Every structure is written in C-alpha cells, then in structure tokens.
Amino acid sequence: MRGNLTSPSGVSRPLKPLGNLLKRLLRGSPARPPENLPPASHNGSDTERRLTFMLESVPVNLWSTDARLNITFSQGAGLHLIGTSANEQVGMTLYEVLKTRDPGFTPLAAHLKALQGELVRYEVEWRGRSFETRVEPLRSADGHITGTVGIAIDITERKTLYDALQTRNVYFAALFENAPEAIALLDERDHIMRINRQFTTLFGYSDDEAVGKNINELIVPNELVEEGEKLTAQVAAGANVSAESLRRHRDGHTFWVSIAATPLRVSGEPARVYAMYHDISARKRAEEDLRALLLVDELTGLPNRRGFITLSEQALKVATRMHRDVLMIFIDVDHLKHINDTWGHLAGDRALIDTARVLRDSCREADLVARLGGDEFVALMTADSDQTAEIVGERIHARVETHNRETERGYALSLSVGATRSKAEGTMLADLLAQADTALYEQKRGRSRPQALSR
C-alpha cells in the first residue's frame, strides 16, 4: 500500500457530503441493502435504507472507528473491488486491517491525525486499486471526538487514464523538445507560446527571448513580414502550408528555411499554428553552385552558351526600354587546332583563358561577354554610336598586341572579329548571332572591316 497525505485543499473532489451521509448512517443500525429499492417514505429508517442502497451502487468505501481504532462500520460498493464485503472488517482493529502499527504509514497516520481533530486527505494504492481518501474526526453530540470516519472513492480508472495522458504528454514533450526540426507553437495572434531546443539553435533566441513575441516580428525579414502574416493566416484558417523562404537569425543575418505549418485546434479554443523550420541554406548554395556550373564555362569563367542566351534576353529587354541599338560581336581564336597539336591541349586551354581575359579587359563591365564553345566567343553590348564596333575592335586589337608582347607562350594569340548592329526592339537573338557569324566569316576572307586582329 502506498499513499501521501495532503492538506484539505489538496483534493478538489468534494467528499464532505458523503462524510455527512456516513454520520447519518452511524446514528442507527446499518443493514444490508434490500434487493430492490423500496418505495419512497418519509421516515428515517426508509431514508437510511435508500442511502445504503446508494452506497452499494457506487465505487466507494465508507467506514468508521472508535477512539481506539476499532472498526465499527464498513460499507460500500468499492469493497468488493478489493476482495472484501460490507461489515466484514467490523470488530477488527485498524492495525489488523493495515497489518502495521507504524505511525508514519499514511492511512494509519491519517486516522491518528483525525483523532487529534484534523481532516486529512490522501491517495492510496490498496490491493491493486487506487483510492482518493478522506478521514475526519467522528464527534458526539456534545462535540467530543469519539472516533474517526472515512470515505474512499475508487479512482483507478481515472488515475489510469491520467497516468496514460501524463505518459503521452511526457512522450510528446520529449519528441517536441528533441525534434531535429526547429518548432514553434503560435497562438491566434501569431505570438509564440512555446519553442523547442532546435529553434534556439537555429534562430539564436532563448525561451525567455522568444515566448510572447510575434513570430513575424522576431524572425521574418522586414520586407517579408506581409508574406509571413499571410502564411500564418492560411494555417489558422485550416490549411496545411509548405513553403521556402528567408528567415532572420538573432544576429541579423538571413538564411533559407523550409517551413511546414499545420493548424492545431483544441476544443473551444482559437486555432493555433504548429510551425516547423529546417535550414536549407546548404541546399540553396548547392543549387546556386549547380546553376552557376550550368551557366558558366568552367575553363574561362565566362558565361557559356546557356548562360549567354539567358543573360542576353534580359540585356535585350533593357536595351529596348532604353530605346538603344545593340551590337553583337563574334570572336574566333585563330589557329587553335594548330596550337593544340603543336604545344598540347594545356597550351590550347591557356589560349582560351588569355582570350577571355583580353575580351573582358576590352569591354565595359555592363557588356556581356561569353564563350559559346570551342574557339568561339561572343560579346553583346549597347551601341553608343556608329563607331562603337570600330572602337571595341581597336581595343581588342590593342589588348592582343599587349598580351603577345608581354607574355611568352611560344605562339602568338590571334583573334578574328565580326560585328553586327541592330535595333534591340523586335530583334531575335538567333538572328543577331547568325548575322555576327556571317560578318566574322566575311572578315576572315578579308571582304569587310575590321581586319583580322593579330600580330
């Protein structure tokens, strides 16, 4: 048997009415309940029989003792749950029933306190059942304590349910706290009610710093607050939401997270939001790196054909808005096959890298320079005047001359250039490329200017 004494306020379920009932029964000679509920009557004996019948119908145990703790009364439907029957223990001492004289033993201590005038409540485990118990003094008509009176309500099912709920709560609390995702529980105003350990790790805020704060003000960048409010509103309305967005750390830096938010409803309460955050910064960086690899020529660092097409479409739109013409320049590395065959492919790669540097140095920062593949390069820029093509051609020629003069490669770098000018509005990129390629071909044959740019 296990139990703990509590103060009179420690048990919320009111036991006093049943205690008074027991005292009323003790005034007469309690009898076994009748087989059937007797007809209503106004005399005291009939009332006691009715009360007795009620006692035998609910899982409670009622008893009384004299001042020496001899049991003088024992009745209630709860008795059969612990393997005994009404009045079976009458005549025995409480010491015999409890099989101890230890005054620290909770049930015995409660009766000893009751003999001193105290009302005591406690919970106790008895023969595999759980009971919520109340023991108080039994007084005579003149107020003297003549014994004790007790009532025990079987709470086994309730306690089993409570323990199960507690176990589940502990289990889910452990899952919440130790989840690998950052989790925040929000109220109907988007204020944080609870966060887990990973939330602190991810965003840098402790419980004291986060709880009670508006989630959108705490971790959402200012320019994205409206987006954050829409997201939580959708969830509060009953939607399950998944999204990827930037969020802000306590130190101010922003990073990419995936967000999974679901509504959490408790009966009779406004909808709450259960939000999980996962850091996807590494994935975003990998995606950017992959995107760069797809758009950038690995050897020269210039945009590749795919990158050039992607960027040039935007450049044409900008030139159209500015009502400017565009200039497309096509560049070939002369004799690249001869360089590869004579000095090796590493020398050929150096020639391509040198060409990329020459073209970058010859063009403005806003101009688009790319390697289309093999020995072919291209540059797209706005045409400031009718002389733009000639100016750029001369600049390329000068850079090539300087490179060959200052760099010893064993061979001279030589470039062929062809250019075409067109209005940006309505121009197709493929047409510009084709026209520039034709101009390059004609230039190589010496039928148009500028001339071949070489030593």
Image (cartoon, grey):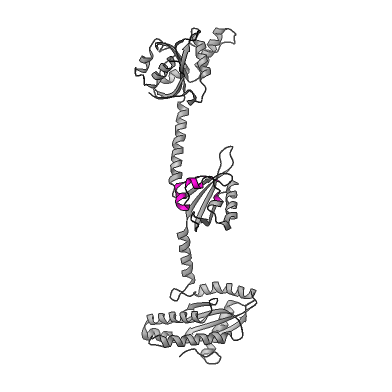
Please tell me how many numbered marks the rendered image carries.
Answer: 0
| Residue 94 lies in quadrant | top left
Q: Position of residue 385 (x, y in %)?
A: 61, 84
Viewer-closest of 224 and 426: 224
The image quarter containing residue 110 is top left
Query: Is 322 positioned to the left or the right of 122 in the image?
Result: right
- Residue 265 location in percent, x, y? 56, 41
As displayed, is residue 302 above or below residue 182?
below
Span of residues in magenta = 190-215
Q: Quadrant of the N terminus?
A: top left
Is residue 159 inside the magenta stretch? no
Identify the residue shown where x is 58% and y is 43%.
271
Residue 194 located within the stretch drawn in magenta = yes
User: Residue 324: image x %, image y %?
Assistant: 63, 78
Tell me if I can see residue 34 in this picture.
no
Against 350, residue 164 (above or below) is: above
User: Residue 127 location, x and y as percent?
Assistant: 39, 22
Of 31 and 389, the residue lying toward us: 389
Up the image or down, 279 lies above or below 19; here it is below
| Image quadrant in which the C terminus is located | bottom left
> Is 334 drawn above or below residue 99 in the view shown?
below
Q: In this rendering, does residue 201 appear at all?
A: yes
Point 57% across, 49% down: residue = 232
